[in-house]
Amino acid sequence: MTRKRNGAWRATGVVTALATAAAIASVAPAQAQSTAQLSAWVSDGWGGGTITSQPAGINCHQSAWDPYATDDPQPSPTGTCTASFEVGTTVTFTATPDQGSHVNQGPAPNPVTVRTGYNYTWVLFCPNDGLCSAG
């Protein structure tokens, strides 16, 4: 009796192992990442402005800041500074300075072709009065 039971358990184990292997084999292979994050970084040039993307997704604004006028730290950017885009999408950026500021450098790189992993662009806004950090 024991012999039959062991054989039944072995058969059940083999069937279970085969069914598990078949289930694993039927699962579709892992798909490549289809979207990735793209970030717009506004450097601390002390000027103000907005960087936007085409296609839409990034709309990031940095307020102008005078480090000599206040002990407060530079305000953080507002709006959407990081967005998801399909891998392979080419994203073009436009930097628009606020009144009293200008675009000193960037956006760079521009355009960006989104790839898996880290994607970014950056821009440096400076005030028109010449006061500008090194970035």
Image (tube, rainbow, N blue to C red):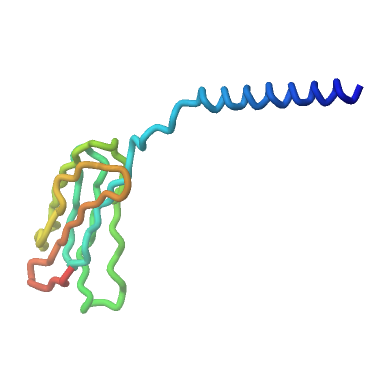
Residue extending furthest front? 3
Who's the residue at 85% across and 20% down the image? 4
> Where residue 95 appears, x then y in whole percent?
14, 51
- Of the pair 84 and 117, the residue shown nearer to us: 117
- Of the pair 18 and 91, the residue shown nearer to us: 18
> Where residue 63 appears, x then y in whole percent?
23, 61
- Please state if 103 lies on the left or on the right of 122 as rendered: left
Query: In the picture, which quadrant includes the N terminus?
Result: top right
- Please state if 10 lies on the left or on the right of 87 as rendered: right
Who's the residue at 11% across and 60% down the image? 105
Residue 77, compared with residue 9, is above or below; it is: below
Query: In the picture, which quadrant includes the C terminus?
Result: bottom left
Who's the residue at 30% across and 72% down the image? 73
- Please state if 101 lies on the left or on the right of 76 as rendered: left
> Where residue 84 appears, x then y in whole percent?
32, 41
Residue extending furthest right? 1
Marker count (numbered): 0
Residue 60, compared with residue 36, is above or below; it is: below
Who's the residue at 22% across and 36% down the image? 89
> Where residue 88 appears, x then y in whole percent?
24, 36
- Of the pair 3 and 64, the residue shown nearer to us: 3
